[in-house]
Image: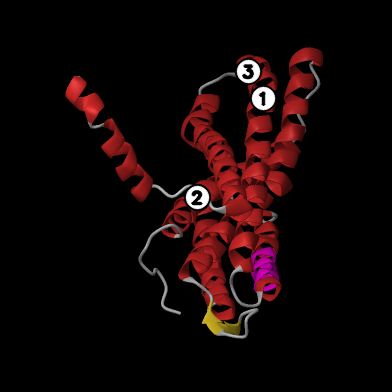
Amino acid sequence: MLEWISDLPALLALAQTKVRPPDGWNDHIQLLLRWIHFIAGIIWIGFLYFFNFVNVSLMKSLDGPTKGKVIPQLMPRALWWFRWGALMTVLAGIFYFIIILHSEPETWVNFGKWFGVVLVAFVIIFFLLRQSFPVGKGWILGVIVGLLVSVMAVVLLKLMGHEGVTRTGAIQAISTRALSIAIGGGLGVIMLFNVWGVIWPAQKRIIAWTYDNAEKGTAIPAESAVLARRAFLASRMNTWLSFPMLLFMATAGQPYALFSV
């Protein structure tokens, strides 16, 4: 023990040479945003996986009266953390992305291109989710969305992966880090829009109908099945999109270049 204590000053000196604390407000803000992004993301994706890997099978095993007791109690609480976790994750990620782009050429031009392409992709997905994909045909939607987000990624690389003039007048290509965040973050934004634009509106109505049925005996409208199917497809889509999304977000911090620009 005494030998270990005697070596402590040398260990602390070595640590100071290896660990660089945040330098200035920019680094502190980036660290804070990443921290919020990680915590909120764990909450969001954790509930997403709970809904898809646990809750779907559980609800199938429950009878009507049991669902009338479980759904009004469980789902509002779970969906609250789910949707607000999604919003906090994406907002922190977008602010972080803007900071990263600020050191790149044509900051706001690239941000506008990024958001425009992602928004167009979601509008197409939203339209597809309004169509009828009965049980057993959901894979068709999966294939279409897979092709769509692949095209989205290629378009982002083409539009953003070019050389531009920095604020100092130098010619610089946008970094592979920014491109990785652009694709992974784009998938995250689509997932957020699915949460707030498809899943939550449908589930809110289903929860209210289930509660009225259990408490007042009011019949559940036939529209409930359509909304439940649409919410399920959007949620399952988000689950599949989360895998490449997490991959691209992870590669943004790697020292090797994922893309050649």
Can you identify the residue that label 2 sits on? 242
Sort mark 3 into few (<14), some (14-19) or many (20+) by Cα contacts within 10 Å. Answer: some
Q: Main SS of the magenta segment?
A: helix
Asked if residue 177 is positioned above or below residue 189 in the image, the reply reads: below
**Alpha-carbon distance for marks 1 and 3?**
11 Å
Residue 93, image x, y percentages = 61, 52
Amino acid marked by disc 2: Ser
Q: Is residue 221 left or right of residue 99?
A: right
**10 Å neighbourhood of mark 2: few (<14), some, or many (≥20)?**
some
Where is residue 29 shown, x and y percent of the image? 62, 49
Residue hosting label 3 = 70
**Residue 77 bears which disc, if any?**
1
Find the residue positioned furthest to the left.
3
Question: Who's the residue at 59% across and 83% down the image?
Answer: 164
Q: Mark 1 and mark 2: span between their CA atoms?
A: 22 Å
- Residue type indicated by callout 1: Arg
Looking at the image, tell me whether mark 2 or mark 3 is earlier in sequence order: 3
| Residue drawn at x 72%, y 32% as measured from the top left | 206
Residue nearer the viewer, 236 or 224: 236
Helix, strand or loop at label 3? It is helix
